[in-house]
Image: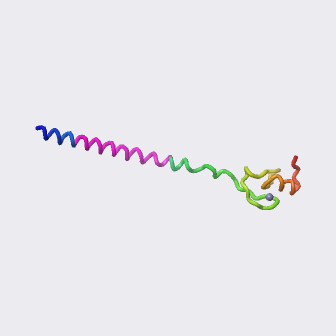
Amino acid sequence: MGRILFFLGLALVAWMIFKSWQRKQLDEKPSDKPKQKSSLGRKSQEEIMPCQHCGAYSPMSEGVLMQGRFYCGMEHAKAAGEKVH
Ligand SMILES: [Zn+2]
């Protein structure tokens, strides 16, 4: 009788380990998809523009925009005849 209870307990423990492993597998699968999605759509918003004076390509945050014309720096905006104060 004692041996049967021992094997019954062993089977129960094995079943519980299997169930918790199965739940872990199911939980991990759906959480992977939103993580991949959130990594997209950042940094790609910055536009690279050519300088109207020298033609060098610079990110918009690094250059200057004057009346719709982009320059890689203040020096080239001045050199191109823009009114810079
Ligand atoms: Zn330039």
Give the image quarter of residue 6: top left
Left or right of 76: which side holds 59? left
Q: Is residue 83 magenta?
A: no
User: Residue 55: percent from the left, percent from the top?
Assistant: 78, 61
Residue occupying the point 84% across, 54% down = 75
Give the colouring mode of the picture. rainbow
For the N terminus, which image quadrant? top left
User: Residue 44: percent from the left, percent from the top?
Assistant: 64, 52
Left or right of 52: which side holds 43? left
Left or right of 25: which side holds 60? right
Spot the residue most to the bottom: 55
Spot the residue most to the left: 1
User: Residue 54: percent from the left, percent from the top?
Assistant: 80, 61
User: Residue 9: percent from the left, percent from the top?
Assistant: 20, 39
Residue occupying the point 71% across, 56% down = 48
The image shows residue 3, relative to residue 61, as above or below, that is above
Left or right of 57: which side holds 1? left
Q: Quadrant of ligand 1?
A: bottom right
Residue occupying the point 51% across, 50% down = 36
Residue occupying the point 37% across, 47% down = 25
Q: Is residue 18 magenta?
A: yes
Main SS of residues in magenta: helix
The image shows residue 66, relative to residue 5, as above or below, that is below
The residue lying toward the viewer, choosing from 34 and 74, is 74
Number of numbered discs = 0
Q: Which residues are magenta?
A: 11-34
